[in-house]
Image: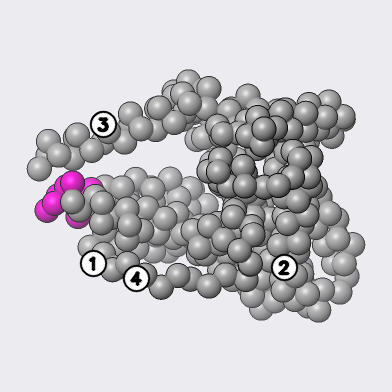
Amino acid sequence: MNDMITFYINLQCKLISRKLKRLGVNPVLGVVLFSIAFILFSFMLFYKMEISAYVYTGIAVVSIFSINSSQRLGFLKEICGHTLWKIRLLENIAVAIPFCLFLLYQTAYVFSLVIFLFSIILAFTPIMRQHSVRLPTPYFHRPFEFIIGFRKYLLLVLFSLFLMLMAYKSDNMNLGLFSIVIHFGIILSYLGFLEPSNYITIYNKSSKGFLIEKIKTTILYTSVSIFPTAVIQLITFPTSAIPLLFIILIGLLILIYFLICKYSNYPDVMSLPHTILFITSIFLPILLFYTVPLYWKKSRQKINHLLQ
């Protein structure tokens, strides 16, 4: 059994290493950068937020849930057999520990204990059977990314709605705005999905027409997603109209920019250098005068290759 656990740990390390190398980053550097990003995010979340411990605990719970999907555990059960509960326990605790340690640093002892106990209890929870019933979505058949993303990240969507509810209960306008920012981040993760190339070749459009259609669809369905929470925010906090409008406009522009960047690398995912340039351009908008035309041209070249 110990040999199986050791084999599984080595296998996961190799898989992570390969994914990082595919993104063009050294595995050790990738782990260091991820650790720094996690620490910075944690401090930012706790900065001037009254219910940050609740939000942080929610993020931890969603993160632990994400590695306990029935499809993933069903596959592991076939490989690991009776060792599965040990692997689940090891993985759950590994995900929980960083959150627990930071909460201990923030003297939020009860929340840290809740996360730790939850990770242990979930490891011994029976695997839920998969059902053939598909979860309905608020989208039509066209937006490939939105349908897949909504079903995959439903817990995160519900979490953003929970934040809006907490903003209403605690009379915290900034928390409500933060929940909408989180929702834009979730939609950004939707757009990260890459459709098979035959999804593109069936379009009877030019590369320009294809990209414009994708942008229009993204704007439409992002508006559908954000509308309920935006209305609640305006009704609850009327004075937040201007910052809310600013967040929506900036959020839509970032989504459009990301969409263009994504297809400039198609059929591969965005490499680390491209991702860094994408993030840097957002914080230094003057770079957009260079990056937007560059990525637009590359995207059209990639798509033209498929449409020819």
Q: Main secondary structure of the magenta part?
A: helix
Check disc 2 and report the residue beneath it: 224
Span shown in magenta = 79-87
Circle nearer the N terminus (3, 4): 3
Specify which label sits upstream in the sequence, 3 or 2. Answer: 3
Foreground pick, 29 / 77: 77
Real-space CA distance between mark 3 and mark 2, rounded to the nearest whole angstrom: 43 Å
Instruction: Say which element carries label 1.
Output: loop
Residue pictured at 70% horizontal, 76% vertical: 168
Label for residue 126? Answer: 1
Circle 3: residue type: Asn
Q: Which circle, 4 or 2, is nearer the viewer?
A: 4
Q: Nearer the viewer, mark 3 or mark 2?
A: 2
Q: Is residue 176 above or below residue 186?
A: below
* Label 4 SS: loop
Task: Indicate whether 120 appears above or below 283.
Answer: below
Q: In the image, which is nearer the foreground, mark 3 or mark 4?
A: 4
Query: Residue 241 placed where, x, y %?
Result: 87, 67
Amino acid of disc 4: His
On the image, numbered disc 4 is attached to which residue? 131
Q: Residue at left 36%, top 70%? A: 132
Left or right of residue 205: residue 154:
left
Q: Around disc 4, counting alpha carbons within 10 Å, would you say few (fewer than 14), some (14 to 19), or many (20 or more)?
A: few
Disc 3 target residue: 10
- Visual colour scheme: one colour
Mark 3 nearby-residue class (10 Å; few <14, some 14–19, many ≥20): few
Q: Could you tell me residue 218's position as x and y percent?
A: 72, 55
Q: Return the x and y of residue 114 as percentages of the image width and height.
A: 39, 64
Q: Is residue 51 above or below residue 100?
A: below
Q: For the residues carrying marks 4 and 1, which lies nearer the camera in this image?
A: 4
In this rendering, the answer to whether 196 lies above or below 30 is below
Front one among 295 and 53 = 295
